Every structure is written in structure tokens, then in C-alpha cells.
Image (cartoon, helix red, strand yellow):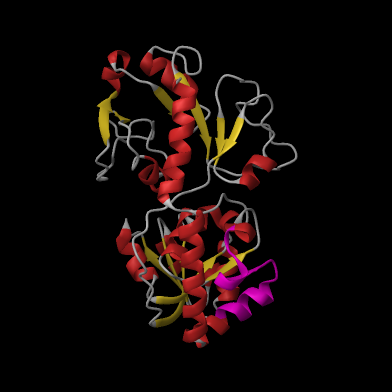
């Protein structure tokens, strides 16, 4: 499998299998390797060594991975070697017209990461399965000591409306908003983000959760992305949530864990209320943590994958 989505991969390689991550001299998207991650069950394998490597299963995550795996392994996924395709994204540009690249393949199971995505993609003849996200429990980290909202968004300026970055400035009128993730420093100089929006940069691993959990409430602004692992991690850390009611968020955040709405006014008022009422924020945060542990635990995620891996490899 390729190191495509770091957070999802971290959960996936926490299982009981051996995971081979291709690496090339350029360390590019097709050969990133571990990229410094400490994943005990995963090891890097040089692309030139792949033709002779014993592989039971190929995990595809991008349309080009089928041809890439065929070229590097000398074996065709789904024909010469077992394969699954993990679709991380909601269909683009339109759900009604988006036919999945694997729609004409009946030999490779198509795994969607949310029920919403499975419903919205036209998966054609591909056998589909939903295996929802799983996150490691790093413990309750919430302190809420800083009267502000926190968000985790990668490349918010480039992805703008897709991730709801345009909502940050108007919502910051109700509460200061600190944003972590790749490219968030660009928010500090973008004129569209005038207000109390602060881009805090990219901090990897659990360290970012320590900073995020010092804020009073977690803000999830995504319009059309899959269910963000950052949202689940914040819930698992014990944070109350204010989220845009789009894609899977309304089904992932229960009413007692925060506020999910498509009304900007309601979102703004919810931010202001949680920031001004630490007791209410703490109660909602506890409910968010309980829900995340019950529905998005790592053990359930890995057990679901074990069943599919055994089924496909058999």
C-alpha cells in the first residue's frame, strides 16, 4: 500500500499484519515510504525490490494505483494478486454524475469510508463495502482553558470552499478561531480571512491535539469532504463540536455532543455559547468522547478490516 493519507494509514497499519510501503529515491507521492512515521508493523520496501516481494494483498487508493501496482509488481491487481480499493473521498464534482473509476470492475472490492460516500458514488458493478474510520484513543486531553475555537484543516486557502475556509472569518466574529494544518499560515495574510482567525501551522501527531484541546470548542467547517479524522480525534479528546451539516457530519456528531447545522447564524451562536460557558462545553465534550469511542474505536476498525482481508485473500 502507498502512504497516501497519513492519519488513515496510521490506523490501518496498527493491525496484526505486515504492511509494505513503497519507497523510491525521490520520496514522491508514489514512493513516500514511512516519511518518518513510527509504525512498528509497517516497513519500507524499495520499488526496485517489489517484483520479487511476496505480497498477499494490494491496497489501492488512487485510480493510477492499478497501473502503478501492475508495473512495479509485475502482477495485475484483482487478477494475479488480491486487491481492494479504498475510496477516501466524496464524489466530485457532483454526486449524481460521478461514476467511480472502478465501476466496471467486479474483481476488486470497493471500500468506502462512510455510508454517505457509498450512497453518493455510482459504484457500478464493483462490490462495495463500508468500513468506517477508526482512531486510536489517546485519552481525554480536553482542558478548554483558552476561550477560543480550534479547527484542523489542511491547505485551507487552496481548498477554500470545499473545506469551508470561507466560513472562518464570519464565524470568528462570534469567537476567535485557531487553525492547525498544512498551509494554515497562509490564512494570516489572506485578506479574505480578516478577523480573529489565526493560522497556527502544521504540528504532527498527538502534539497538535494537546494544543487543539486547550481551546474551548472544536469547529468543523468542511462542505464536501469525507468525514475528517481530525473531527473524530477532537471528539475522542473530549472536545465539544460545532459542525457544518454536510456529508457524514450530521450522523457522526450526536445532539448532546455539540451543534450541527447548515445555518450560519446557528453555528456562530453555538460557538459563542460554548466559548462563554465552560461547564456546558465540558458536558458536551464528554458526550462527544463517549460517542467517538463507541462508534469510531480502533479495535472495531481493525476487526472490520481483518474480516475483509481474510475474505479477499482466501
Quarter of the image where the N terminus is located: top left
Please state the horizontal and vertical placement of residue 79, each as a whole percent of the image: 50, 13
Vertical position of residue 220 compared to residue 105: above or below: below
Image point (63%, 74%), residue name: 267
Q: Quadrant of residue 161?
A: bottom right
Query: Is residue 183 visible in the rendered structure shown here?
Result: yes
Image point (74%, 37%), residue name: 97
In the picture provided, is 37 more to the left or to the right than 274? left
In the picture provided, is 12 more to the left or to the right than 266? left
Residue 265: in magenta span:
yes
Q: Which residues are magenta?
A: 252-271
Image point (47%, 72%), residue name: 286
Please state the horizontal and vertical placement of residue 46, each as a whole percent of the image: 26, 25
Vertical position of residue 20 compared to residue 89: above or below: above
Image point (61%, 77%), residue name: 268
Q: Quadrant of residue 214?
A: bottom left
Please state the horizontal and vertical placement of residue 209, each as a whole percent of the image: 36, 65
Query: Is residue 190 visible in the rendered structure shown here?
Result: no
In the picture provided, is 152 more to the left or to the right than 255? left
Amino acid at each position: 500500500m502507498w502512504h497516501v493519507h497519513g492519519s488513515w494509514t496510521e490506523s490501518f497499519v496498527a493491525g496484526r499484519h505486515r504492511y509494505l510501503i513503497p519507497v523510491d529515491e525521490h520520496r514522491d507521492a508514489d514512493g513516500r515510504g514511512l516519511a518518518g512515521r513510527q509504525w512498528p508493523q509497517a516497513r519500507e520496501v524499495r520499488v526496485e525490490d517489489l517484483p520479487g516481494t511476496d505480497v498477499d494483498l494490494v491496497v489501492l487508493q488512487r485510480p493510477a494505483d492499478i497501473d502503478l501496482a501492475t508495473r512495479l509488481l509485475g502482477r495485475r491487481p484483482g487478477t494475479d494478486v488480491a486487491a481492494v480499493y479504498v475510496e477516501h473521498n466524496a464524489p466530485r464534482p457532483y454526486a449524481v454524475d460521478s461514476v467511480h473509476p472502478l465501476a466496471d470492475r467486479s474483481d476488486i472490492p470497493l471500500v468506502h469510508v462512510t455510508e454517505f460516500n457509498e450512497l453518493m458514488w455510482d459504484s457500478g458493478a464493483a462490490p462495495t463495502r463500508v468500513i468506517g474510520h477508526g482512531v486510536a484513543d489517546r485519552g481525554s486531553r480536553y482542558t478548554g482553558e483558552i476561550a477560543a475555537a480550534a479547527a484542523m484543516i489542511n491547505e485551507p486557502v487552496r481548498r477554500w470552499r470545499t473545506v469551508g475556509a470561507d466560513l472562518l472569518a464570519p464565524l470568528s466574529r462570534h469567537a476567535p478561531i485557531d487553525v492547525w494544518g498544512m498551509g494554515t499560515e497562509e490564512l494570516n495574510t489572506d485578506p479574505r480571512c480578516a478577523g480573529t482567525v489565526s493560522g497556527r501551522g502544521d504540528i504532527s501527531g498527538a502534539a497538535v491535539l494537546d494544543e487543539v484541546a486547550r481551546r474551548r470548542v472544536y469547529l468543523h467547517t468542511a462542505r464536501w469532504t469525507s468525514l475528517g479524522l481530525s473531527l473524530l480525534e477532537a471528539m475522542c479528546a473530549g472536545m465539544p463540536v460545532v459542525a457544518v451539516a454536510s456529508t457524514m457530519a450530521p450522523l457522526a456528531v450526536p445532539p448532546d455532543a455539540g451543534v450541527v447545522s447548515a445555518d450560519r447564524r446557528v453555528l456562530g451562536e453555538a460557538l459563542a455559547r460554548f466559548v462563554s460557558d465552560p461547564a456546558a462545553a465540558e458536558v458536551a465534550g464528554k458526550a462527544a468522547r463517549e460517542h467517538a469511542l463507541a462508534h469510531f474505536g480502533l479495535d472495531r476498525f481493525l476487526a472490520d478490516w481483518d474480516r475483509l482481508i481474510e475474505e479477499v485473500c482466501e
